[in-house]
Image: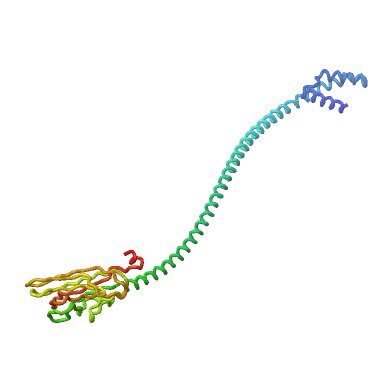
């Protein structure tokens, strides 16, 4: 009996909650069933069931509504949490995309820096090689330059040719006149760089091919002619000449001569003339090398 009552109460509760059969329909069904099984107890059971159902509903329904409200609130809260998590997830995804883009950019920058570093290393290596080559060439050039400088010094020493001399080493007096031309010996050597002039013979001998400059000066007293010439290999070049009845006589002249190695240059006093000299060195013979000449330069001349 009690089991049947409990079953009835559960059915009524289920139907009420889910919007199913109402109390009258349940009662009718139970009545039909009870009449078939136990007609005498049908009314009693119905009355007890109605009373128990009302008591159960008063006990259970408030709890169910409260649970529903709590469940609804929980669902709402969960939805809010889900929306918040969804927004956070979207933000995280955006951050991840931004970080991915930044990482890609950083990788590109790293690759560019690596490329620049390789280029710089190659450039540095090439500069090192160039520096080594430059140092080698500098050493070679330095050695060559030193050799050239030494050759130039030697060549310049060979080109250092200049002399100047006057007639008398001491005292004073006349030279001439002579019945024939006479080669003068300028014994007082003032300068003789290269030793190309011989004070014993009065002759200058060219040590190398080139252009040379020579000068001669003559001095005498009136009443006698003073004349002398610069000769090359026995041929007259230029003459210094003066002739007057009284007072002093002075004359000078100069010439540039092209000489081959071994050519000789000297001064000849003309026959019948005379010159005078003393410590003042009036009569001088000088010469020096202007510049050497190559064979092809001589051919053009």
What colour-coding does the image apply?
Answer: rainbow
Left or right of residue 7, residue 67 in this image: left
Q: Residue at x 83, y 18 (%)?
A: 25
Query: Residue 100's quadrant in the figure?
Result: top right
Residue 236 seen: yes
Left or right of residue 70: residue 43 = right
Q: Residue furthest right?
A: 37
Where, quadrant-wise, is the C terminus in this rendering? Answer: bottom left
| Residue 70 versus residue 48 in the image, above or below | below
Q: How many marks?
A: 0
Horizontal relation, residue 150 to residue 223: left or right: right
For this orientation, the residue located farthest to the front is: 179
Measuring from the top left, give residue 147's x and y in whole percent. 40, 71
Give the percent coordinates (x, y) of residue 20: 79, 22
Give whichever of 289, 97 is nearer the camera.
289
Residue drawn at (75%, 24%), measured in percent from left and top? 58
Q: Quadrant of residue 81?
A: top right
């Amino acid at each position: 009996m009690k089991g049947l009552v409990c079953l009835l109460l559960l059915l009524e509760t289920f139907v009420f909650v889910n919007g199913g059969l109402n109390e009258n329909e349940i009662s009718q069904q139970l009545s039909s069933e009870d009449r078939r099984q136990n007609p005498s107890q049908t009314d009693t059971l119905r009355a007890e069931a109605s009373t128990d159902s009302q008591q159960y509903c008063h006990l259970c329904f408030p709890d169910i509504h409260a649970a529903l409200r709590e469940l609804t609130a929980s669902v709402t809260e969960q939805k809010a949490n889900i929306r918040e998590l969804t927004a956070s997830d979207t933000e995280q995804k955006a951050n991840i995309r931004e970080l991915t883009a930044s990482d890609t950019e950083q990788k590109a920058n790293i690759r560019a820096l690596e490329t620049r570093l390789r280029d710089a290393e190659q450039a540095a290596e090439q500069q090192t090689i160039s520096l080594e080559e430059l140092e080698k060439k500098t050493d070679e050039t330095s050695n060559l330059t030193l050799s050239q400088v030494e050759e130039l010094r030697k060549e310049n020493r060979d080109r250092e040719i200049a002399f100047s001399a006057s007639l008398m080493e001491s005292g004073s007096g006349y030279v001439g006149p002579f019945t024939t031309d006479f080669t003068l010996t300028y014994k007082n050597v003032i300068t003789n760089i290269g030793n190309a002039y011989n004070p014993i013979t009065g002759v200058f001998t060219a040590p190398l091919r080139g252009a040379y400059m020579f000068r001669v000066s003559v001095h005498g007293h009136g009443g006698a002619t003073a004349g002398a010439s610069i000769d090359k290999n026995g041929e007259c070049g230029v003459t210094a000449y003066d002739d007057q009845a009284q007072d002093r006589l002075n004359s000078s002249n100069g010439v540039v001569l092209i000489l081959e190695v071994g050519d000789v240059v000297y001064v000849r006093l003309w026959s019948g003339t005379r010159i005078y000299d003393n410590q003042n060195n009036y009569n001088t013979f000088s010469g020096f090398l202007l510049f050497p000449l190559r064979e092809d330069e001589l051919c053009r001349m």
